[in-house]
Image (tube, helix red, strand yellow):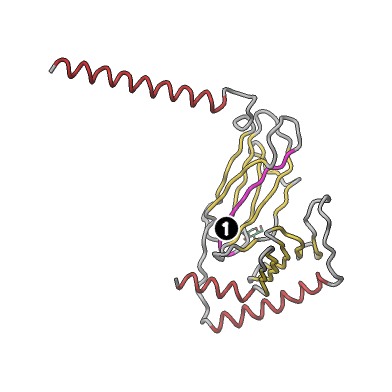
Amino acid sequence: MMKMMMKLLLFLCGVLWVSADVLHEDLAIVGCSDSDGEMMYALDGEELWYADFKKGKGVDPQPPFVVHTSYREGVYEQAVANQQVCRSNLKVCRSAMKDIPDENDAPSNLVIYPRDEVELGEKNILVCHVSGFYPAPVNVSWTRNGQKVTEGTSINVPFPSKDSSFTQISRLDFVPQIGDIYSCSVEHLALKEPQTRTWDVEMNNPQSGPGPAIFCGVGLTVGLLGVAVGTFFLIKGNECS
Ligand SMILES: *[C@@H]1O[C@H](CO)[C@@H](O)[C@H](O)[C@H]1NC(C)=O
């Protein structure tokens, strides 16, 4: 309970407003820590705009077919100013709470999956979905057949959940080729070693190999055979006694 409250407090230090009406949830986040910062606008869980402080500009991550919401001039500059406010608020919060011991939660959930159905040779996107961690952010790195891949990767800014943990989604553009194995590794403050998930084109391609249906069939057959043999001996055993 105490832990939860502390988190909430820390979190509130950063969040400017969250307004919800019946139909849509509008979210604006300003967050900061000693080493990182975030400013993001979202609607119904979709990022509409965020400040990329490393590149020094605002980013509108929606794909081209979405009608882009236009943000007023100076919104990035505003985000930079908000970071200063956030940092000084954080300082105040910290001293008010006698330097809260930071509670770190490692990611509770890490999954890797292709965005679209896998077709060999067809462009696709691998998604690495990390959630349940605190504080933000995580670092995500990708490999193809054991080699580090940076081209075609992207990660979105941390998205807060109602339980005050965070979610981040990293993506990798890829073309499925038979035999390729991908992995995404996640680094977080609360993890001694990176957490890794692998994804194998072959295992996930229905045209190659017998596929799960066969294994299921074999399993079922063996299982039924076992029941039959067991019943046989049961009856035999009863006859003898
Ligand atoms: C993420 O990477 C940066 C740069 O390499 C590093 O400074 C930072 O400590 C890393 N964060 C985590 C949580 O491992």
Q: In which quarter of the image is residue 58?
A: bottom right
Badge 1, how many Cα within 10 Å: few under 14, some, many 20+?
many
Residue in front for this viewpoint, 126 or 87: 126
Q: Residue at x 60, y 53 (%)?
A: 130
Viewport quadrant of the N terminus: bottom left
Q: Classify 188 as above or below 124.
A: below
* Start-end of magenta stretch: 124-135
Q: Looking at this view, name the residue that lies furthest to the left.
A: 241
Q: What element carries label 1?
A: loop
Q: Give percent across and percent down for residue 34.
A: 64, 71
- Residue at 79 percent across and 74 percent down: it is 78
Side (left or right) of 235 relative to 222: left
Q: Which amino acid does label 1 sit on?
A: His
Q: Is residue 112 left or right of residue 102?
A: right
- Find out whether residue 228 is within the magenta segment: no
Question: Which residue corresponds to the image point at 52% horizontal and 23% vertical from the top-left?
Answer: 214
Q: Which of 149 and 21 is in front in this view?
A: 21
